[in-house]
Image (tube, rainbow, N blue to C red):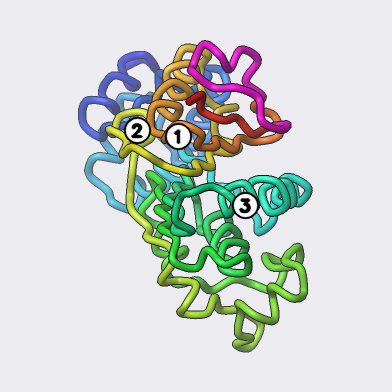
Amino acid sequence: MDYALFVRKVKEHLSLDLASYKETQMKRRLTSLRDKRGFPTFAAYFKAIMQDERLLGEFKDRVTINVSEFWRNQSRWEVLEKVFLPEFAASARTRRLKCWSAACSSGEEPYTLAMILDRHGFAGSEIRATDIDAGVLEKARAGRYAERSVREVPKPYLDQYFVRDGQDYLVIDRLKRMVRFEQGNLLLDPFDRDYDLIICRNVMIYFTEPAKQDLYQRLADALRPGGILFVGSTEQIFTPSRFGLENAESFFYRKKA
């Protein structure tokens, strides 16, 4: 079984569309993992991951590329805090925002959003956080982070929203209740609608250009008119109008009314 057949089998049996990822990067990552586990071919590796839960979990971890930080690219969060939250507050809409953190990994991003919303009077907001990896979602629900993980959290937020437990920091229960973690596949699952804010950062860079274009359109369709899409610092949309979006700030796009 060559890599192309491996990709088809993975999609058929595991609902993971490896063809939507940049082939050179993904093939290199998976070949390295396959060789590390001692399988000479992708045929042998596929058979093994279908029979061994540990190998399957490791494979999914390698595919999903989990990287997350609290307040990642802090200046972008400040734009959300100082520009868009006042806009939401000034609108005729309720202060209960409908938000989605897509590809949320181990929870740092949606908890960052929850802290900001709570601090600015949007505590009743709904934050849905999804990731394809069940393992990182369990960590996210637990809300336990090592000291190194919270080093970028501003001290007022750290003092208000975390409790020290030995060497770790625990997210307080009130904040946990603001976030609903669910398993989800960005490439295959249908999306809900009428979001005020969608955060989808640092995941597009791994996708092929057709997969990115399709995903941008689906994300735009999931926003309410006037809703905001917040993307990563390497994921600028060069022609947002084709998706019914317009530039709002750097890396923030508003759905046209």
N-term mark: 2 or 3? 2
Residue 136 visible in the shown view: no
* Amino acid marked by disc 2: Tyr
Q: Nearer the viewer, residue 225 or 100?
A: 225
x and y, in percent, of residue 39 in the image: 40, 33
Residue 2 visible in the shown view: yes
Name the residue that disc number 2 marks.
45
* Amino acid marked by disc 3: Leu
Q: Nearer the viewer, residue 161 or 122?
A: 122
The region drawn magenta spans: 236-250
Bin the neighbour count of mark 3 within 10 Å (Cα to Cα): few under 14, some 14-19, many 20 and up.
some
Name the residue that disc number 1 marks.
34
Vertical relation: 190 (above or below) 216: below
Q: Secondary structure at mark 1?
A: helix
Vertical relation: 167 (above or below) 149: below
Name the residue that disc number 3 marks.
85
- Was residue 244 drawn as part of the magenta stretch in this picture? yes
Q: Left of 7 or right of it: where is 136?
A: right
Figure label count: 3
Report the Cα–Cα distance between label 1 and label 2: 6 Å
Vertical relation: 6 (above or below) 139: above
x and y, in percent, of residue 80 in the image: 67, 48
* Amino acid marked by disc 1: Arg
